[in-house]
Amino acid sequence: MKIIKFKNKKKYKYIRKVNIKNLILNISVGLHDFEKKEKQRVRFNIDISTDSNIKPDNTNLSSIVNYEDTINKITDITKTKHHELLEDLAENIFDIIFKSKIVKKVKLKLEKLDIIKETESVGIEVSKKRDE
């Protein structure tokens, strides 16, 4: 009798995420006139899921999501433009992050920290996934 062994091509199933936690920027955002005149603190929490089939390679930085670069790009768009809505800002952040082909999913949580005194924060949480 011959024994047939099935070869397991993948030993492990990876989930890779880059996390940016509690980034606080002073930005121009909001519909109200007072929000257009003065910047306000907004907290950013971002989870970026990447293609788990791509092995990180320190000689090829396109194999990873560079969190410092991502933070710098977010800082740049918040310095140069007023966003009427957090949802508009979220879409601009999605556009930046999804430029990397290895990004599969992004979850954003954006919170205004000082807008309503009776709360710690108010904001939105949005996820976007690349079509397979």
Image (tube, helix red, strand yellow):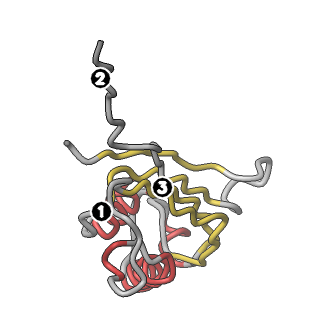
Identity, as a three-letter code, of the amino acid under mark 3: Arg
Q: Which residue is mark 1?
A: 102
Q: Nearer the viewer, residue 105 or 50?
A: 50
Q: Residue furthest front?
A: 1
Residue at point 64%, 71% (across, down): 41
Q: Which mark sits nearer the N-terminus, 2 or 1?
A: 2
- Where residue 56 appears, as percent x and y from the top left, is 41, 71
Identity, as a three-letter code, of the amino acid under mark 1: Ile
Q: Which mark sits nearer the N-terminus, 3 or 1?
A: 3
Q: Which residue is mark 3?
A: 16
Q: Which mark sits nearer the N-terminus, 2 or 3?
A: 2
Left or right of 32 in this view: 123:
right
Marks 2 and 3 close (CB-CB < 8 Å)? no
Marks 2 and 1 close (CB-CB < 8 Å)? no
> Vertically, is 3 above or below 83?
above
Residue at point 55%, 56% (across, down): 110
Is label 3 in a helix, a strand or a loop?
A: strand
Left or right of 20 in this view: 126:
left
The disc placed on residue 4 is 2
Answer few, some or many: residues within 10 Å of disc 2's Cα (few below 14, many 20 plus, some between 14 and 19). Answer: few
